[in-house]
Amino acid sequence: MQLGFVGLGRMGSNMVMRLARAGHEIVVFDRNPGAVAQAAAAGLRGVDSLDALVRALLPPRAVWVMVPAGAATESTIDGLATLLAEDDVVIDGGNTRFHDDVRRARALGARGIHYVDAGTSGGIWGLADGYCLMVGGDASVCSRMEPIFTTLAPERGYLRVGGHGAGHYVKMIHNGIEYGLMQAYAEGFSLMQASEYDLDLGGIASLWMHGSVVRSWLLDLASRALADDPELARLEAHVEDSGEGRWALEEGIARAVPLPALAAALFARFRSRDESPFADRLLAALRHQFGGHAVRTHD
């Protein structure tokens, strides 16, 4: 199947290779000419603009957008809207907020262009293992694109989960669960690291992968990270978030669904970015004020 692909970052570059290896004809574009040149050297057809990408495709066209959520996705889809024609398809595989999917589907639909949102999970391991795809959009359009979806996904790793926005909605919840799981592992291993025992944390992570009820791919990744650097000394305790956890928490508030694990995990990420949190300094000041407790000060 022929597909245009915009965005050759860490995931996008692997996705196009997985598709090309399966025999799909992929035309790629990225704002970074070096990324396009690298893809072309691997045998894909590279172009230097969205206009050239669209002209290289036969109608009805399909274009997969894999760029950062927000302004980059917005400008890319706006640009494609002026270039594509009736019955063409735009697939957004990034981490878009589901409200934006509904709006974009409506705007593109007014031009006769179809829109599909594809929540994509798999990270840098997807080239070999495949990507879990949570897809939203009209059933007939999703069915048309299934040769792409089933190539990218491992067996049973693709599902149309609903209409426009449903794919990214389910991916948002997926990432919210991921936040909680990661925080639980982090806290448990932190407690073991602080214990009186000289524990092999990498070995324990590996052990738990065999028959334990807490085994998971995330735990396998923890085992690899700890085997490589048992004290994680090369890393700073700074954890970013890409938005989905915030959106999921906001959705929980809007629907009065309690999400305490997600809230705690998200706030822990916020805290990781502050070397000397103001709230903790205020706690120290209050203890000193009411009880004369000792405080530490900067010289």
Image (cartoon, rainbow, N blue to C red):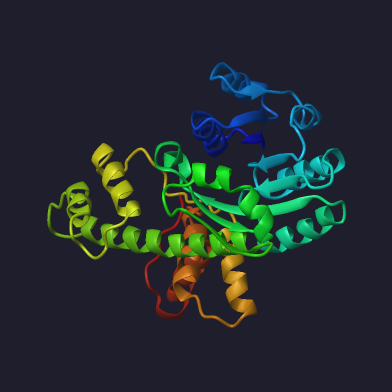
Residue 65 vertical placement versus 251 (above, below)? above
Residue 73 location (% of width, % of height)? 72, 46
Figure label count: 0
Work out which quarter of the rendered image holds the N terminus and state it. top right
Residue 151 vertical placement versus 171 (above, below)? above
Residue at 82% x, 56% y is 109
Q: Which residue lies furthest to the top in this view?
A: 41
> Dividing the picture into quarters, in which one does residue 196 lie?
bottom left
Residue at 82% x, 40% y is 84
Residue 8 vertical placement versus 117 (above, below)? above
Q: Can residue 220 be seen in this view?
A: yes
Residue 23 location (% of width, % of height)? 53, 30
Residue at 33% x, 52% y is 217
Residue 133 vertical placement versus 11 (above, below)? below
Residue 133 location (% of width, % of height)? 52, 52
Q: Which residue lies furthest to the left in this view?
A: 197
